[in-house]
C-alpha cells in the first residue's frame, strides 16, 4: 500500500517564520503617508496595531522566532498533513504527481488561523484586551474569533450586511467562539450611523465594515484592529505552511516543479510559496503560480472584454469588441495580481518575475472543485477551487508536453459552510448569461457617441 | 439595467454570491471597483453603468487608483480620529 499522507511529528513543527523581505533582490517601496507623502512610520499605525506587530510588519530579519504560546496553539491542528492526491491524479490521467497541504484541518476550516493566532497572542502580550475586525463571508472573522477566545480577548466583528444575512453559519461560529458579530453598517459607530441615515437600505460593503472596525479600535480603550490578509506580517505568519511543506517533501526526497496557490489577498498563496521563492532566489528551478479569479470565460462570445491588468488605471478603458466564438482574451488570462487588495509582497514578486499568475473563470473553478470532491472526497472552499483549476490546467500542459511534473499546492480550506455556492453551480445559476444579439446592438448604440477606447 | 439586477456572480471580495444590483452600488453612489472585471464578459456592464451614472460620477469611478493598503489604513485612522473628536 502506497502512502497518501506525509506527516510531521509535533516536535518537528518549524520554530521560526520566514520573512521574504530579507531576501528580496529589490526591496519593497515603503508605503507613503497619504497626507505628507513621507514613508509611513510606526507611530502612524500605532492607533490600530500593537508595536510588536508593527515591528514585524517592517522587519527585514530573515527568520523570526515563533513564540512557545503560539506553537502550543498551532499544535492543535499543525503540522498539517501533506497529501498525495492519487485519485485526482488518476482522474486527470496526466504525467503528474500532485501533493497538497490540507489547511482545511484547522478548527475554523481554513488557513486563516495561522495568522489569527499570533495576532491575538501579540495583542495580548502588548496589553490589549479587545480586537476588532471586518469580514465578508466570515472566514477571517471566525478565525479571529477563535484566536481571541484562545488568548482571552474580547472580539467584535463587523460583518458586511449582505453577508450577515446570507451566511448565518459563520456568524454562528463567531458567536460560539464568544465574539460579537454585528451587521455592518451598524448603529455602534459614527460612520455606521451616518451611512445608515444616508442609505437606509444599503447592503453594506467591505469598505464600510473596515471603517467601522478601525473607528472602533481608534476610539475604544485597550482595543486594536486585526487584518487577515495583504499586510507583510500576515504573510509572515502564514509561511508556517510552506516551511512545513518543505520539510515534508524533503522527507520523501521530492522537490516540486510547480508550486501553486489561490490568490485573493495573497496570504494562503504566499504562505505556501514564499519559502520556495527563497529557493528560487537562490537558484533553484521552480515555477510558482498564483491562481486568481476572473469572470471572463475561457472562450467568450463577446461583445466586450477588458485588460483587467490595467483595470486599476481605468482610463482609458480598453474594450475589445466582437470577439467571436474562438477568441481567447490573452491579456486577461495572463493574470494580474495587481488589483486593489492584493498583498504588496505578492505584486512585487510578480513584478520581479519570481512568480506568475493565471486567472480562471468561476465555472472552470467549480468544475475542478466538483472533480476534486468526487475523487479525493474533501469538499474544497470555492476560493480553493481556483487553485484546483490551475492544477487541472497544469496537468493538461504536462500531458501535452509529455513531461513529468511534481505539483505542490495549498488546499486552503474546506467548503462545508459554502455549500450554497455549490448548489448555485449545480443548479445552473452560475452559467454565463449570454446576451441576445439585439441586446448587444442596443447597448452598442447606447455607447456609440462616447469617447472611443484605444484599440488593440 | 433592471433585467440584469438579479443575475448572480460569486464575489471574490466577500466570498459568496451577490446580484449585479449589489455590485453597481457597492460603494454608495459608486459601483464596486471590480464591477467591470467581474461582469463585462457576461453583460454590457460599462454601458449600463454609464447610462445610470452622471458623466461626473463615471469619471470619479474611473479615476480611482489602487492604494497601498497601509496608506489607506492611515487615511481611515485619520478619518476615525476626526470623527472621534466630534463624538456626539
Image (cartoon, coloured by chain):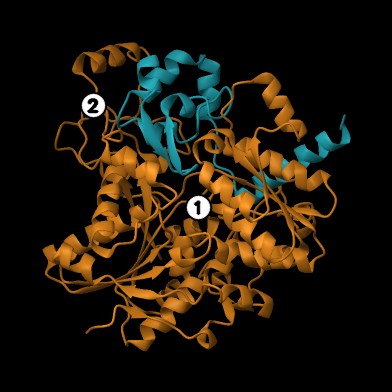
| Chain shaded orange | A
Residue beneath the point at 40% across and 51% down = A383
For residue A265, the mark is: 1
| Quarter occupied by the N terminus of chain A | bottom left
For residue A410, what is the image quadrant? bottom left
User: Where residue A13 sits in the image (x, y, percent)?
Assistant: 53, 82
User: Where residue A72 sits in the image (x, y, percent)?
Assistant: 63, 77
For residue B67, the mark is: none
Colour assignment, chain B: cyan
Q: What secondary structure is marked by label 1?
A: loop
Residue beneath the point at 35% across and 15% down = A447
| Quarter occupied by the C terminus of chain A | top left
For residue A434, the mark is: 2
User: Where residue A214 sits in the image (x, y, percent)?
Assistant: 72, 44
Chain identifier of the residue bearing label 2 in the image: A
Can residue B48 be seen here? yes
Quick one: A428 or A450, which is closer to the camera?
A: A428
Along the polypeptide, which appears first: circle 2 or circle 1? 1
Amino acid at each position: 500500500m502506497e502512502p497518501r499522507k506525509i506527516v510531521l511529528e509535533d516536535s518537528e513543527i518549524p520554530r521560526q517564520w520566514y520573512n521574504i523581505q530579507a531576501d528580496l533582490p529589490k526591496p519593497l517601496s515603503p508605503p507613503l503617508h497619504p497626507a505628507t507623502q513621507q514613508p509611513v512610520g510606526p507611530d502612524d499605525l500605532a492607533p490600530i496595531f500593537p508595536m510588536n506587530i508593527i515591528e514585524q510588519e517592517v522587519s527585514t530579519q530573515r527568520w523570526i522566532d515563533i513564540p512557545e504560546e503560539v506553537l502550543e496553539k498551532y499544535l492543535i491542528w499543525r503540522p498539517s498533513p501533506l497529501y498525495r492526491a492519487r485519485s485526482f491524479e488518476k482522474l486527470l490521467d496526466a504525467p503528474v504527481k500532485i501533493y497538497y497541504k490540507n489547511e482545511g484541518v484547522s478548527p475554523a476550516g481554513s488557513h486563516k488561523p495561522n495568522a489569527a493566532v499570533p495576532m491575538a497572542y501579540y495583542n495580548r502580550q502588548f496589553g490589549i484586551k479587545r480586537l476588532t475586525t471586518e469580514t465578508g463571508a466570515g472566514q477571517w472573522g471566525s478565525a479571529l474569533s477563535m484566536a481571541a477566545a484562545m488568548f482571552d480577548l474580547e472580539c467584535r466583528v463587523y460583518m458586511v450586511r449582505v453577508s450577515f444575512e446570507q451566511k448565518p453559519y459563520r456568524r454562528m461560529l463567531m458567536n460560539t467562539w464568544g465574539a460579537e458579530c454585528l451587521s455592518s453598517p451598524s448603529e455602534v459607530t459614527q460612520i455606521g450611523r451616518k451611512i445608515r441615515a444616508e442609505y437606509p437600505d444599503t447592503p453594506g460593503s467591505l469598505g464600510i465594515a473596515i471603517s467601522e472596525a478601525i473607528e472602533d479600535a481608534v476610539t475604544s480603550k485597550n482595543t486594536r484592529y486585526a487584518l487577515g490578509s495583504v499586510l507583510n506580517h500576515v504573510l509572515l505568519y502564514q509561511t508556517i505552511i510552506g516551511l512545513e511543506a518543505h520539510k515534508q517533501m524533503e522527507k520523501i526526497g521530492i522537490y516540486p516543479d510547480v508550486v501553486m496557490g489561490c490568490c485573493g489577498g495573497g496570504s494562503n498563496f504566499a504562505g505556501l510559496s514564499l519559502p520556495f521563492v527563497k529557493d528560487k532566489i537562490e537558484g533553484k528551478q521552480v515555477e510558482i503560480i498564483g491562481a486568481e479569479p476572473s469572470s471572463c470565460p475561457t472562450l467568450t462570445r463577446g461583445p466586450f472584454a477588458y485588460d483587467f491588468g490595467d483595470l486599476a488605471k481605468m482610463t482609458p478603458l480598453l474594450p475589445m469588441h466582437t470577439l467571436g466564438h474562438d477568441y481567447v482574451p490573452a491579456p486577461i488570462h495572463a493574470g494580474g495580481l495587481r488589483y486593489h487588495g492584493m498583498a504588496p509582497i505578492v505584486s512585487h514578486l510578480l513584478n520581479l518575475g519570481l512568480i506568475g499568475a493565471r486567472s480562471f473563470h468561476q465555472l472552470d473553478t467549480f468544475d475542478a472543485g466538483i472533480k476534486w470532491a468526487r475523487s479525493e472526497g474533501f469538499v474544497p472552499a470555492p476560493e480553493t477551487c481556483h487553485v484546483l483549476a490551475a492544477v487541472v490546467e497544469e496537468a493538461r500542459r504536462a500531458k501535452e508536453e509529455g513531461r513529468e511534473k511534481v505539483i505542490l499546492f495549498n488546499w486552503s480550506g474546506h467548503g462545508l459552510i459554502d455549500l450554497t455556492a455549490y448548489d448555485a453551480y449545480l443548479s445552473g445559476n452560475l452559467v454565463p448569461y449570454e446576451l441576445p444579439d439585439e441586446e448587444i446592438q442596443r447597448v452598442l448604440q447606447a455607447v456609440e457617441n462616447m469617447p472611443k477606447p484605444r484599440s488593440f | 439595467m433592471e433585467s440584469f439586477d438579479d443575475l448572480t456572480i460569486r464575489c471574490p471580495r466577500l466570498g459568496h454570491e451577490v446580484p449585479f444590483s449589489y455590485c453597481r452600488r457597492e460603494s454608495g453612489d459608486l459601483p464596486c471597483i471590480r464591477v467591470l472585471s467581474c461582469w463585462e464578459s457576461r453583460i454590457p456592464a460599462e454601458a449600463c453603468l454609464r447610462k445610470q451614472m452622471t458623466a461626473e460620477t463615471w469619471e470619479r469611478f474611473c479615476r480611482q487608483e489602487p492604494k497601498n493598503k497601509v496608506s489607506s489604513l492611515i487615511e481611515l485612522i485619520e478619518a476615525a480620529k476626526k470623527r472621534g473628536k466630534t463624538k456626539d
